Amino acid sequence: MENQEKIDFEKASVEEALKTLSVDSNQGLSEDEVKNRELQYGKNTIPEKKESLLKKFLSHFIGPIPFMIELAAILSGILHNWPDLIIIVALLLVNSLLGFFQEYKAGNAIEALKKDLALNARVLRAGNWKELLAADLVPGDIIMVKLGNIIPADVKIISGDYLSVDQSAMTGESLPVNKKVGDTAYSSTIAKLGEVQCVVIGTGLNTLFGKTTELVATAETKSHYQAAIFKIGNFLITSTISVCTVLFITDLYKIKVSHTLTEDFTTLIIFMLVLLVGGIPIALPSVLSVTMAIGARKLAKMKAIVSKLTAIEALAGMDLLCSDKTGTLTKNELIIGKIKTFNQASEEDIILNASLSTSKVAEDAIDKAILDKLGDKDKLKSFEIKKYIPFDPVIKRTESTVQNPDGSTVQITKGAPQVILKMTNPDEKFQNEVMEIITDFAKKGYRTLGVAKTDAKGNWIFLGIISLFDPPRDDTLDTLKHIKEMGIGVKMLTGDHTAIAQELGGQLGFGSNIVAFQEVEQKDEKTKEELTEKADGFAEIFPEHKFNIVKILQKLKHIVGMTGDGVNDAPALKQSDIGIAVSGATDAARAAADIVLTAPGLNVIAHAIENAREVFGRMKSYTMYRISETMRLLLFLFLSMLVFDQHPLTAIMIVIIAFLNDIPIMMIAYDHMASLEKPKEWDMKEIFSVSVGLAIVGVISTFGLYWIAQEVWLLKSEMCRTLSFMAILCGGMLTIYLMRNDKMFWHKPHPELKFFIATLVPLVLGTIFSVYGFGTDDFVGIGWKYVGLSWIYILIWFFICACTKILIYKLLRVSHWDK
């Protein structure tokens, strides 16, 4: 066999293809040749790439935060600090299991793509026709394809009348495509009409379908959530370790001077461990995962199944949505549009005559649309079809010989309007009039049919033109408007002709700047990016085009969402920041997507975006709170050593603060949160400015209370520590109410009851511990009098912190405007 990579089978003649593949179309391949080619090209399957479940699970224990949590757990075990060890390991497992189970549900995209391959094929081998598994096909095999078959490989048609192929799942074209001898048909498309013989020109990964799976396999998207958590984790870990190092060196020097190395060194190690546990955001991944998981459960009730938790965060930040047209924006079904009548024919006459020239059994989209328009099929019973000639791609029309109720016989035809018009021998004026209408329909993207019948003398009479189109979904226009109002740009992607896409784009308000992406790809890199950014949509595209469009937009710093339903959408769905498989999507599209819609239409997406933004608000609120309180604790301990030359908190106090701060606060997942008006992602400048700013104010307030206790109330040092504990815990817990929005804390929406109770419990317990102590010399009670006065002090500073937050946000906005 000649080297098939050197020939373009799309352009080659049938003779050239057969010669290149070294096959006789009347005999097929011999069994020996089949074995040789199977060794060379492999099975007609998609190679499966699966990661072991154990490896997936263990991957959740890798990263800056997990490493530090694991270190804290090891140290706790070494020092026999069992309560801390249990809490730390539990939090680590909860976070890892949540992420693992969500990924497990997502499945394997390539495995789903593999299932879409045709199972069987009728093959000519050594002169005999056989029924074989599609996996056994090799390049050069001669196969039969007919109505209802799933085409098992990329093939070139070598004989037969014609083949009508539904290739919407591969190319996105809404209408079946007619193929003739010499044309190529793609693997996994469906034969709707006709019967042909073909030669296999590509199998497995060498098919268009296979190349699509390779794109899915190579698609890589950097998670904005993971990047944000990495930055936050590194910041808190670095801060914690820095403070621990300084305090350790300082205390070690004091121990050396006091000559109590063994006893005090053990106490110092325990304190450093506790500080490490208190400062590292152990619960941060767990709280955020729980928040996203609860959001995912709510989305499921809205008919949006989340396969990856991080998809919720990506959905909140999405600023550009690339929408597949066929089956997403439109219904993926043909309907009759405008009908233009001639020669005293009515619209009803035209539909009736077109129905009489229609197959009643074949699954043809055009015939179905005509019969649906006719409605009452009983109208056809009074007519008798004497002869029916199905659509012929050579003459481009169907024809029926019909006996009317009065006994007269006529011929009726429908097909390409130019062909039908020519049959009627029109004069120049009439021909120009009809051609102008045909051209006008074509510019608007409509497919057209001409209808004609014979008169009593046997002359053809042109009755009219029927336009057909794939209509938008009923809710598409309103949904797109709503999505745009949320600050999200929308681009339409389709395999249809540019004229069809432009017409639909005008109807749905996309704009008229819809271009063929093949033209864009020919430009230089800078021009390509500019055209992609400015375009309202793209037409005449293939799977790799959608994939490339998404990558270009991501390169331009967009957070890109992609909707789709077909195999052709799978690579782009996987590559996008947020892949959305719409209702009725193929297994391939669903497996590649981050969110799967189970209800039709895009309206679900709009509600999902709103919900995702609420979830993101909760995640951001907790993250800022956690940064602020960690920095407040670390700065207070660090500065206390410089100012008072002593630890203002004991190890047991730090453990209680860490426990009461994190465990109940998981209820933040249920808190009421306003849906953000615009796309929102992790703005590190805002997060660190507000968090650290409030932490500094909190440290000042804590120092103030410590100074009052020591210098004004003249309390003992152990009682001053209790007041420090109260200021850090209670003052810090109130900070969560400041982080819920960028306004004053009394603005709506008000806190949800479960969240309010979850924050009230630590405040009550912290108050009780401060009043009565914790039954140990390291934590003594100070009575209701000083606790009451301290609460007044804390509330005053809470209002000062609220004003500080408003000031920081004003400065941030001014800084943003200056840019």
Image (tube, helix red, strand yellow):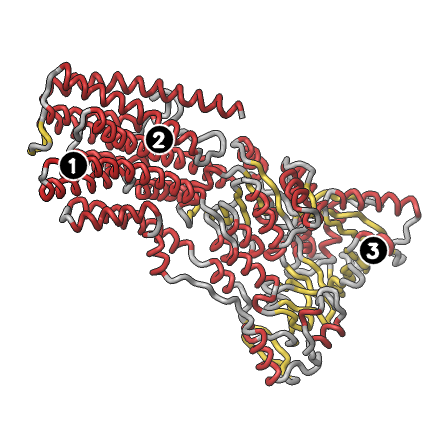
The answer to whether residue 26 is above or below residue 378 is: below
Name the residue that disc number 2 marks. Answer: 672
First in residue order: circle 3 vs circle 1: 3
Name the residue that disc number 1 marks. Answer: 651
Write the residue at 35% across / 32% down: 624
Residue lying farthest to the front in this orientation: 257
User: Which type of secondary structure does the marked residue at label 1 adopt?
Assistant: helix
Residue type indicated by callout 2: His
User: Which type of secondary structure does the marked residue at label 2 adopt?
Assistant: loop
Q: Residues within 10 Å of mark 3 (few under 14, many from 20)?
A: some
Write the residue at 54% across / 54% down: 571
Residue type indicated by callout 3: Val
Frontmost residue, 578 versus 347:
578
Residue 248 occupies quadrant: top left
Write the residue at 28% across / 20% down: 798
Measured as percent of width and height from the top left, residue 697 is found at 30, 22
Specify whether residue 469 is in view. Answer: no
Name the residue that disc number 3 marks. Answer: 419
Measured as percent of width and height from the top left, residue 81 is found at 15, 46
Give the alpha-carbon distance from disc 1 to disc 2, as whole Å: 35 Å
Residue 389 occupies quadrant: bottom right
User: Which type of secondary structure does the marked residue at label 3 adopt?
Assistant: helix
